């Protein structure tokens, strides 16, 4: 090899860096122009120096992104230069899947015994050779499948985030979004969820949506394709559809059909994109979810009902993209403790600061005795309490709104609380324009008692 390399070193160990630098320069392999101490400056240094070789160790300090962070860095480096020689030092077995993945970035110099072998300079003085990485290729099929899946997830995330334009000149969703709303309200993806089955997220979600609709906001609910279908009966959808011809969005997407206009259901100015109660999908995939949610993003404030599937791995992209999560729980210690691990799994995909806990079926005494304990258990900043009322239960059992049957005082109290909840998703100043005259009260049917 005639041309000398321009080299960057970063192993996380200053003495090790210096030893490698001395070896490389003494053996005329190249000149070390930079030694780095963190991963996040590697890309910048390569661009600044025009480096042709980088030698890094897995021990180099990063942003705790682990393998994903390294994969991102190597992908970006390959975007800068296909000929850049990357040397990676780690302590992993030959059959480690991550090492197989590294070979897909055309990395031919992998030293996986936590150190450099005695003949490493001989290897680096020659052109890269396939034989040096052949032992890491055992898992290439799985890695290839993972790469395809990762690419699909990136595409799906983009569709969910930016929305999908329907392939039709006909308007799919019946309600037109007013121009002032398009100007003032940033699109939001809001998740509602139950900490356990039967916690009451449907009741809470429907009442919240109807409250927002009264503010003249275009809001809607999208039922998850993975949960048990429940919203069709819950909103008493039959009178609002043509039973002989109606097909849900989910059904049409599952059949690779074009979603037809009128497939959504509007009740009390809330748009519902729900499933027929007989629908079940075993082969539903991530791209179908992306199309479903992406098209539904035509609705500026979209609620996605996760139901009790809070730790379902298939819902992770929704949680990653969600602006906020309203999770309904209660003071039932048996159910809360039994399902708590699932909640912790959910927080892998969304920050706790974006979660609001609604404690259903509460009372002033329960709130006083156990409220702080509940908040500490979930480690959530904002906790609200919702009292149990027979009128709400009776209304929802009949397919009606939970607002029906409330006394004026109860309704006023509920409005005040939902106004507080709304500030998590709509700017306070905009909310004042939409609803300027709410009276302040200290106690309520729902009470926000904790906010650190």
Image: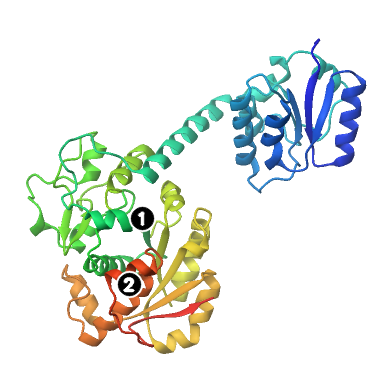
User: With respect to residue 3, does 285 lie above or below?
Assistant: below
Q: Nearer the viewer, residue 290 or 188?
A: 188
For the residues labelled 2 and 1, say whether their Cβ atoms are less than 8 Å apart.
no
Task: Using residue 126 as the reference point, say whether residue 64 is left or right of it.
Answer: left
- Crowd around label 1: few <14 · some 14–19 · many ≥20 (10 Å): few
Q: Residue drawn 18% across and 50% down? A: 264
* Disc with the residue nearer the chain's start (2 vs 1): 1
Which residue appears farthest toward the top when viewing the image? 2
Residue 36 lies, with reference to residue 178, above or below; the image says above
Q: Quadrant of residue 324?
A: bottom left
Point out which mark residue 186 bears.
1
Viewer-proximal residue, 435 or 228?
Answer: 435
Q: Is residue 188 left or right of residue 173?
A: right
| Numbered-mark total | 2
Residue 220 in sight here: no
Q: CA distance from mark 2 to mark 1?
A: 16 Å
The location of residue 345, given as percent across then percent down, is 52, 56
Q: Which residue is mark 2?
A: 432
Disc 2, SS? helix
Front in this rendered view, residue 390 or 167 = 167
Disc 2: CA contacts within 10 A as few (<14), some (14-19) or many (>=20): few
Q: Position of residue 178 (x, y in %)?
A: 21, 55
* Picture quadrant where residue 71 is located: top right
Say which quadrant the N terminus sits in: top right
Label 1 residue SS: loop
Query: Looking at the figure, which quarter contains the C terminus?
Result: bottom right
Task: Give the left or right position of residue 274, taking residue 61 as reference.
Answer: left
Left-right relation of 157 to 58: left
Closer to us: 99 or 94? 99
Residue 438 vertical position relative to residue 124 in the rendered view, above or below = below
């Amino acid at each position: 090899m005639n041309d000398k390399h321009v080299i960057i070193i970063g192993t996380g160990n200053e003495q090790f860096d210096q030893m490698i630098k001395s070896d490389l320069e003494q053996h005329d392999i190249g000149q070390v122009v930079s030694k780095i101490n963190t991963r996040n400056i590697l890309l910048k240094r390569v661009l600044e120096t025009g480096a042709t070789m980088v030698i890094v160790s897995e021990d180099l300090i990063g942003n705790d992104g682990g393998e994903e962070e390294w994969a991102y860095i190597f992908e970006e480096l390959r975007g800068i230069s296909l000929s850049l020689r990357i040397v990676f030092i780690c302590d992993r077995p030959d059959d480690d899947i991550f090492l197989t993945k590294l070979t897909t970035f055309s990395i031919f110099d992998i030293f996986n015994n936590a150190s450099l072998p005695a003949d490493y300079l001989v290897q680096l003085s020659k052109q890269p050779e396939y034989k040096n990485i052949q032992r890491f290729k055992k898992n290439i099929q799985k890695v290839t499948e993972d790469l395809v899946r990762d690419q699909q997830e990136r595409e799906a995330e983009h569709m969910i985030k930016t929305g999908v334009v329907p392939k039709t000149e006909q308007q799919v969703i019946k309600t037109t979004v007013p121009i002032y709303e398009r100007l003032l309200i940033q699109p939001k993806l809001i998740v509602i969820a139950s900490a356990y089955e039967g916690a009451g997220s449907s009741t809470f979600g429907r009442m919240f949506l109807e409250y927002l609709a009264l503010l003249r906001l275009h809001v809607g609910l999208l039922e998850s394709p993975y949960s048990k279908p429940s919203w069709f009966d819950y909103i008493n959808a039959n009178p609002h559809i043509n039973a002989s011809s109606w097909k849900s969005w989910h059904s049409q997407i599952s059949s690779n059909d074009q979603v037809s206009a009128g497939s959504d259901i509007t009740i009390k100015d809330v748009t519902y994109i729900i499933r027929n109660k007989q629908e079940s999908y075993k082969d539903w995939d991530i791209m179908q979810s992306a199309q479903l949610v992406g098209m539904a993003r035509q609705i500026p404030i979209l609620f996605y009902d996760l139901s009790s599937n809070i730790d379902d791995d298939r819902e992770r992209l929704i949680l990653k993209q969600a602006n906020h999560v309203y999770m309904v729980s209660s003071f039932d210690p048996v159910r809360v403790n039994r399902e708590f691990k699932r909640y912790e799994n959910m927080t892998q995909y969304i920050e706790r600061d974006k979660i609001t806990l609604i404690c259903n079926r509460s009372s002033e005494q329960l709130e006083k005795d156990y409220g702080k304990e509940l908040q500490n258990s979930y480690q959530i900043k904002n906790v609200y309490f919702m009292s149990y009322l027979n009128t709400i239960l009776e209304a929802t059992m009949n397919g009606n709104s939970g607002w029906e049957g409330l006394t004026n005082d109860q309704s006023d109290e509920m409005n005040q609380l939902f106004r507080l909840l709304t500030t998590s998703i709509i700017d306070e100043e905009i909310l004042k324009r939409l609803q300027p005259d709410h009276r302040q009260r200290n106690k309520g049917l729902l009470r926000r008692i904790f906010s650190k």
